[in-house]
Amino acid sequence: MTDLRSDTVTKPTEEMRKAAYEAEVGDDVYGEDPSINKLEETAAEVLGKEAALFVTSGTQGNQIAILTHCRPGNEIILEAESHIFYYESGASSAFAGVQTRTLNGIRGAMNPSEVEHAIRGEDQHYPETGLICLENTHNRAGGAVIPIDNMKEIYSIGKTNNIPVHIDGARLFNAAAALNLPASEMANHCDTVQVCLSKGLGAPVGSILAGSREFIAAARKWRKRLGGGLRQAGIIAAPGIVALTNMRERLAEDHENAQYLAQQLGQIKGIEIVNQVDTNIIVADVKNLKMNSSEFVEKLKAEGVFSGTFGPSYVRFVTHYDVTKKQLEDAVIAIHRTAGQMI
C-alpha cells in the first residue's frame, strides 16, 4: 500500500520513538517540562522569533493567533481558499467572534494592492481590520510557494496600517526548502507564524506558534482557555525536537519525488496535472477519464494506492517521508493501469 493522501500520515521515525521513550518530562502548565521548553526555544531560534509556544495542531495554532491578535467584531483578511477559511470549521467566527474578508489570490498569493484596499477605514458601519493572514505553502493552490517579495510587501502594508500579519506556515519548511532559504527568512515577514511538526517533518503530533515574547505570553493563556494546557507533554515534544532539528534538510527529497510523480502522471492519457509543482503536492484532473474524483480515488484504493479528492474531478497526491521512489514507481504503474481501464 502506498499512501499519498497527505504528509500527515507519516509515522514517527525510530529516533522519534526512542526520544519519546527517554524524554525528560514535567508539568508544562507550570513551565517545568524540560523537553517542551527545549522544543519551544529551538523553534524560536529556527524561526527567528523571540519566543514560541507548543500547540496540539496547526488549526489550534492559527486560532490562538487570531484570538490573541483580534477582538470580537474585528475582520481578518485572508485568501479565499486558505486553510483558515476553508478547513478550520468556521473556528474564527465561533471562537474569536471575527468575520473573514476573503480575496482571490493567484496560486495562493494575494495581490498586495487588493490587501491594502481591503483594509477598513474609520467608519461606524465597518468592522476594524484586526489581522492579515497569509499561507505558505498554500495547500489548495497545490503546495504553491508564496514569493518572498509578496510576503514582504503585504507585511509592509500591515505595519503601515498597524495591522499584524500572521503566516499559516503549516508547510513553511517546504517553502524554505523550495527556495533554498532558512526558515527564519521566510518568517521574517510577519508578526506571528504557525508551523506544523506533524506533516513533512514527520512528528506524530504538534505544531509551533512563534512571535514576540509579549504575544506568546498572551497566546499561552488562550491555549489554556482552549484546553491546550498540557502536563507531562515532553513525551510528544521530544519527537518534535527530532523533527525540527533532523528532518528539515530532507524535504527536498519529497519535492524531487513529487516532480517525478507529476512528470509520470502527466504522460498518462486522460490525466492532466493542473498545478505548478513547487513542493510535495500534485493535483491531477481526471475528468477526461469520464469519472469523478471520488470514483477514481476508490479505484486506485483497490490497486493499493491511496489518494484524496480535491474537487469534483481533481485528485491530490502528496509525497512524504514514508513514500520511497520504488513505491512511486509501482504507484505509477497502478495509476496507469486504472486510467487505461477508463479510456
Image (spheres, rainbow, N blue to C red):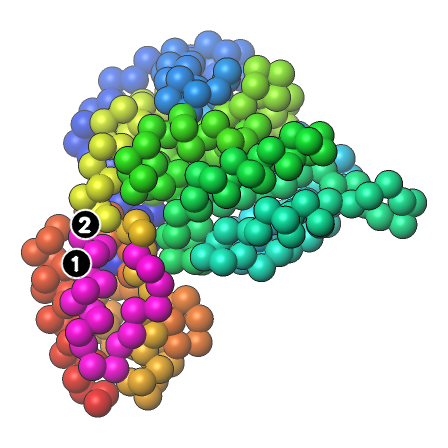
Q: Quadrant of the N terminus?
A: bottom left
Give, as a single range, the part of the protein colored magenta: 256-277
Judge left or right: residue 142 versus residue 226: left
Q: Check disc 1: other Cα within 10 Å, few if <14, some if 14-19, many if 20+.
A: some
| Along the line of sight, the residue nearer the viewer: 18 or 324 | 324
The answer to whether residue 338 is above or below residue 224 is below
The answer to whether residue 71 is above or below residue 144 is above
Identify the image quadrant of residue 291: bottom left
| Along the line of sight, the residue nearer the viewer: 56 or 158 | 158
Helix, strand or loop for disc 2: helix
Dot label at residue 260: 1
Helix, strand or loop for disc 1: helix
The residue drawn where x is 17% and y is 74% is 267
The answer to whether residue 278 is above or below residue 285 is above
| Along the line of sight, the residue nearer the viewer: 275 or 152 | 152
Which amino acid type corresponds to the residue marked 1 in the rendered image? Tyr
* Whole-percent x, y for residue 215 in the image: 61, 21
Query: Are the residues at dot 2 and dot 1 in contact (C-beta closer than 8 Å)?
Result: yes
Alpha carbon distance from label 2 to label 1: 6 Å
Judge left or right: residue 22 versus residue 328: right
The residue drawn where x is 13% and y is 50% is 324
Q: Quadrant of the C terminus?
A: bottom left
Check residue 272 for magenta coloring. Answer: yes
Check residue 125 for magenta coloring. Answer: no
Residue 207 seen by the camera: no
Judge left or right: residue 175 versus residue 149: left
The residue drawn where x is 19% and y is 61% is 261
Question: Disc 2 marks which residue?
Answer: 256
Residue farthest right in this picture? 124
* Whole-percent x, y for residue 40 in the image: 43, 19
Judge left or right: residue 43 versus residue 270: right
* Whole-percent x, y for residue 240 in the image: 33, 28
